[in-house]
């Protein structure tokens, strides 16, 4: 009689035999068989990866240095702050500040002004103040003839630099992003090194151009402010920023503005034509000579064409002829 599978004797052959395991020779470490391959060496980083890593380390170091400098800043109330303290400009002692040498016709340029690398006649500046001239940067230029030269300036910026009706058609956000509101153009004494801060009071004579809020006209005053301006008809205009009887010049896009220096006289140009003369009358705060007060000529010293930029977003081209 065949035994029942439930009650019959156990079979000598297991129903699921385990796979036979190879015996490991004595003294041989586990995993040292010939089938194990050695680990591949790490691939060296590429030049791009190395540069990215170095840039990351430099950024971390710069943030740490900035945090350390911030601990040393003395906080003051807004009314007690000076503009130079707020902007922390002219920090010549900082070894991390790279000052690119002047290019093209530039004789001297301060670190606040960015000269275009590919087009050296183009300059840019960042800022926030559009209502009042607070100097932030300066540029002076070489000239071939010390007795007669011209400095021609053209504002750039495309859609960010509209005037008149085109400006009025912009949205409020687009108007808020408009640039080119303030600029000083004139002549600087050769003996004075421009610092980018309060140069207009001691370095020479400048025309301050301030665009009105509708961007239809440039309001023009002279600096130093105790001088006067005269148009081609002989009418005089004040250089006092607080007075209302200031000279106004029509503003337009791609307008060619500039100055002309000849025989110690400096003229404001529009479209290459003379429109206004700077009339020197008195010694200024820096103690300069009164010059020939009877004819308004500047003191008899060496001058170079110069531009003083404001703490205002600005982009322009400048050429000396």
Image: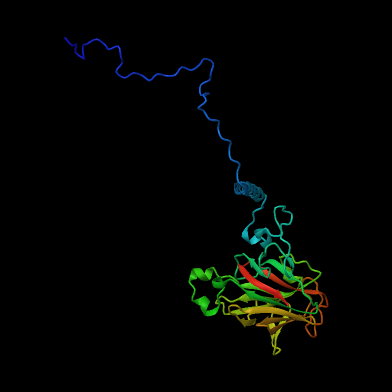
Determine the residue located farthest toward the left in the rendered image: 1
Colour treatment of the image:
rainbow
* Residue closer to the observer: 32 or 86: 32
Determine the residue located farthest toward the bottom in the rendered image: 233
User: Could you tell me residue 42's position as x and y percent?
Assistant: 58, 38
User: Could you tell me residue 108's position as x and y percent?
Assistant: 75, 66
Q: In percent of the image, x 56 and y 35: which residue is there?
A: 40
Side of 70 relative to 301 (left or right): left
Which quadrant of the figure contains the C terminus? Answer: bottom right
User: Could you tell me residue 162's position as x and y percent?
Assistant: 55, 75
Which quadrant of the figure contains the N terminus? Answer: top left
Q: In percent of the image, x 73 and y 62: which residue is there?
A: 101
User: Could you tell me residue 85's position as x and y percent?
Assistant: 67, 59
Q: Is residue 301 above or below residue 113?
A: below
Side of 39 relative to 306 (left or right): left
Q: Quadrant of residue 264?
A: bottom right
* Residue closer to the observer: 249 or 77: 249
Q: Is residue 3 above or below residue 139?
A: above
* Residue closer to the observer: 243 or 189: 189
């Amino acid at each position: 009689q065949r035994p029942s599978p439930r009650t019959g004797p156990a079979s000598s052959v297991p129903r699921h035999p385990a796979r036979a395991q190879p015996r490991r020779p004595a003294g041989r470490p586990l995993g040292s068989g010939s089938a194990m391959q050695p680990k591949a060496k790490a691939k060296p980083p590429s030049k791009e990866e190395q540069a990215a890593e170095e840039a990351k380390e430099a950024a971390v170091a710069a943030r740490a240095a900035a945090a350390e400098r911030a601990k040393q800043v003395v906080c003051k109330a807004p009314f007690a702050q000076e503009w130079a303290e707020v902007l922390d400009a002219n920090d010549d002692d900082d070894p991390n500040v790279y000052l690119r040498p002047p290019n093209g016709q530039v004789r001297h340029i301060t670190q606040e002004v960015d000269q275009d690398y590919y087009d050296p006649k183009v300059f840019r500046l960042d800022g926030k103040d559009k209502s009042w001239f607070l100097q932030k940067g300066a540029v002076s230029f070489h000239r071939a003839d010390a007795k007669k030269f011209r400095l021609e300036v053209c504002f750039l910026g495309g859609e960010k630099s509209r005037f008149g009706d085109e400006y009025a058609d912009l949205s409020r956000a687009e108007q808020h992003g408009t640039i080119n509101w303030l600029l000083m153009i004139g002549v600087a004494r050769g003996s004075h090194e421009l610092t980018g801060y309060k140069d207009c009071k001691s370095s020479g004579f400048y025309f301050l151009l301030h665009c009105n809020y509708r961007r239809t006209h440039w309001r023009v005053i002279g600096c130093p402010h105790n001088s006067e301006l005269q148009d081609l008809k002989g009418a005089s205009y004040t250089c006092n920023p607080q007075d209302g009887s200031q000279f106004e010049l029509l503003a337009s896009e791609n307008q060619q503005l500039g100055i002309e220096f000849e025989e110690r006289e400096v003229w404001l140009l529009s479209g290459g034509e003379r429109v206004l003369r700077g009339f020197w009358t008195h010694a200024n705060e820096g103690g300069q000579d009164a010059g020939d007060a009877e004819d308004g000529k500047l003191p008899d010293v060496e001058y170079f064409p110069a531009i003083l930029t404001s703490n205002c977003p600005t982009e322009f081209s400048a050429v000396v002829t």
